[in-house]
Image (cartoon, grey):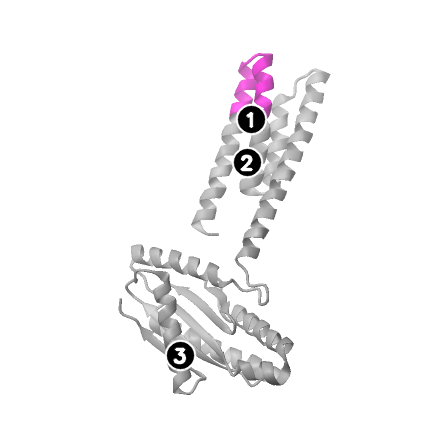
Amino acid sequence: MRSGESLKRAFFLAAALVALGAACVMDRVGGRVLSLAAIPFFLLAAAAAAWGGGLIPGLSVAILGASVFVTGEPEGIVRAAALAISACGVAILADQLRRSRRREAELAATDSLTGLFNRQHFFAAAERARRAAAQRGTPVSVIFLDCDCFKQINDRFGHLTGDEVLKAVGRSLSGSVPDGPVVARMGGDEFAVLLPGVSREEAGRTAEGLREALKAEMASHGWPVTFSIGVATFSEMPASASRMVEAADTLMYTVKRAGKDAVCVEEVPV
């Protein structure tokens, strides 16, 4: 989980505890008016717990928190049960909204054909990596690859087969890199891999491994596609993420001009 998400989760869970604590205090030390005023805080606690931690924390706060309102009288038991049901409903609604928002964010960042991240998300991730690397003094590598002879696939086999090629490339890239690197379709038949903290030598080995895996995938389908790959490593960070992507793109075109189906790796000065 990224640090930003962890902070948001911690914030909402802390807010849930604060709201629940406020509800308990108001119910215990206040009169009837404050006891009624505690109910919104109780519902807010259930919603915050569900938004920050998911359905289980939300329901837990709803059920356990409702026990605060239980008294020995039948009226108190009924009130606590009604509050528990209401708070559970609020928690369920908050969790559904959280999931819906997450799905929308994922769709906005995803290429619909390949399931990889899209260009916009890649640039945003590259910018975050650039800033983090500048603070920590660590390198960042960017792999940029293009499918050689892709136009021939569309001309010979049709665009539906071309789409299948792109899907296969996406699956192969996703399956050939460990968790962590951002893999994206940059548009058309171009793809990129972001490697924060990865040196020139390691990035070169990764790119060669990707090329071999991709060629094997293409050969298994009988598709005459190879790959030109440019790898740019920055030990000192440039002014923008665009510069990192542009450098890797330029190296990819160097491979194209030299005959295609190869990897070009360079450490790029700022």
Q: Give the residue number, with chain letter if any, for mark 3.
A: 253
The answer to whether residue 39 is left or right of residue 178 is right
**Does dot 2 land on a helix, a strand or a loop?**
helix
Precedes in sequence: disc 2 or disc 3: 2
* Dot 2 and dot 1 residues touching (CB under 8 Å): no
Q: Is residue 96 above or below residue 19?
A: below
Q: Give the residue number, with chain letter if any, for mark 2.
A: 48
Q: Say the numbered circle drawn on residue 41.
A: 1
* Dot 3 and dot 1 residues touching (CB under 8 Å): no
Q: What secondary structure characterizes most of the magenta part?
A: helix
* Dot 2 and dot 3 residues touching (CB under 8 Å): no
Q: Amino acid at mark 2?
A: Ala
71 or 145, which is in the foreground? 145
Q: Is residue 200 above or below residue 105?
A: below
Residue count near mark 2 (Cα–Cα under 10 Å), binned few <14, some 14–19, many ≥20 = many
Q: Which residue is depicted at the point 64% across and 31% down?
A: 87
Q: Which residue is depicted at the point 68% across and 18% down?
A: 76
Q: Answer whether residue 202 is visible to the viewer in this image.
A: no
Residue 226 x/y as whole percent: 50, 83
198 or 122, which is in the foreground? 122
Q: Is residue 233 above or below residue 109?
A: below
Q: Amino acid at mark 3?
A: Tyr
